[in-house]
Amino acid sequence: MGRLRKALVVTLLIAGSGLLFAGGAGESRRGPVTEIPGAPAPFDGSTGRQLHIAHISYLQEGEFMQMYRAGVEAQAAKLGMRVTLLGRHNDAQSQANAVSQAINLGVDGIVIQHGLTETMVGPAQQALDAGIPVVAFDVDLENPRIPQIAQNDPQHGRNAIEAIVEDFNGQVDMAYVRVAGILPLDRRDGPIQEVVERESGVRIVAQTGTLESPISVQNASQATAVLRANPNIRAYLAPYDEFAKGIVLALEEMGRDNVKVYSIDISTQDIEIMTRPNSPWVMTSAVNPAEMGAVSVRALARLMAGERVPQDVLVEPMIFTSQMLIEAGAQNMEDIMKAFPAFATSSAARSSWMPR
């Protein structure tokens, strides 16, 4: 087929296609338009353009955050929106500046993910003053107009520490990875401290922790020093899976096979480690990271549509033991979503007009 004939065929196909629909977004000759049948404004096509949101992050490292961002982008696509990702890992000033960038871009909504309350309260208020709805994932922006999206972090902490109590019959010297000032870690810490105070035989004999990059390697170095100084430690509580990877690395390098690791969060790499023969990583409490990203976008979309969103939007965790994963034949995240359907998705922040 000659070039001219090819061009004519393409032209005819485009001319005859009219309005195209994909993932809730129509595309006209002017470009994409957010248009979902039966949806309220601005998702009904009334703007004549594609809605645009910004996702502004503080933590970026690790599989959890990668899957979370994938969930943000996938849910935005289903709702016919485009996403601009802003912010740098562990950089509070960059995150604060990114809010101004988003305002200047004229976005229709903003998701703020993690961060420090003291650096983000002001910028978040500036976005609201500009008429831009905001939701927050795992950061307290101290504003009743900003819904807080979160895993049930107190339950996460309770799940992990109570597993330790049960496995060691309430008698164990343990180490704890603790980083203060990060909202989900602070919320997980409360129940952990309550249980330790209640269980006199459960003793935290060492506590370290850092979010410096690379997180797993930095925490492995700290754990090595802790384990050398405290050979009596038999349990390690790491309430974030990047911490847990570091603890496992330290144990393997030291040849220690008498310490069990308990964590929060899950990923494909975590599953691979937990299902190895004689793995020290025996338990984690988890929520589907991609679903947390999706919930953040759904809550924002509801605000954009003028719907009421609760101040706290929580997703409940599930407990996974290494034995559960082995018995299910799980090797990756897709496997556990098939084996445990309740883990895959949730109804949190969902409206009837949103495409499934």
Image (cartoon, grey):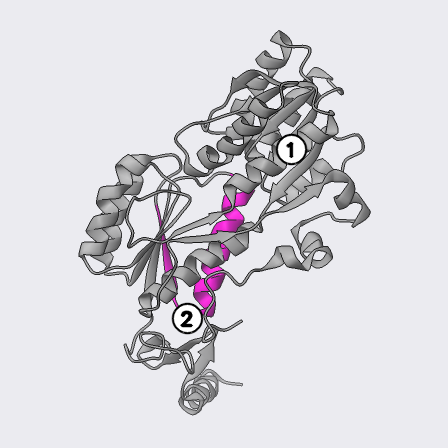
Image quarter in which the C terminus is found: bottom right
Determine the CA span between mark 2 and mark 1.
43 Å
| Residue under numbered circle 1 | 162
Q: Main secondary structure of the magenta part?
A: helix
Q: Give the vertical position of 133 relative to 32 (above or below).
A: above
Q: Residue at x 60, y 15 (%)?
A: 224
Left or right: residue 46 versus residue 104 is: right
| Three-letter code, disc 1 | Glu
Under circle 1, the secondary element is helix
Q: Residue at x 69, y 16 (%)?
A: 254
Left or right: residue 131 versus residue 349 is: left
Residue 37: percent from the left, percent from the top? Answer: 43, 82
Q: Earlier in the sequence, mark 2 or mark 1?
A: 2
Q: Residue at x 38, y 42 (%)?
A: 139
| Residue under numbered circle 2 | 80
In the image shown, does 334 or 308 lie closer to the viewer? 308
Q: Give the vertical position of 231 relative to 298 (above or below).
A: above
Q: Is residue 80 magenta?
A: yes
Q: Residue at x 30, y 79 (%)?
A: 30
Residue 77: percent from the left, percent from the top? Answer: 45, 66
Left or right: residue 137 versus residue 173 is: left
Image quarter in which the N terminus is found: bottom right
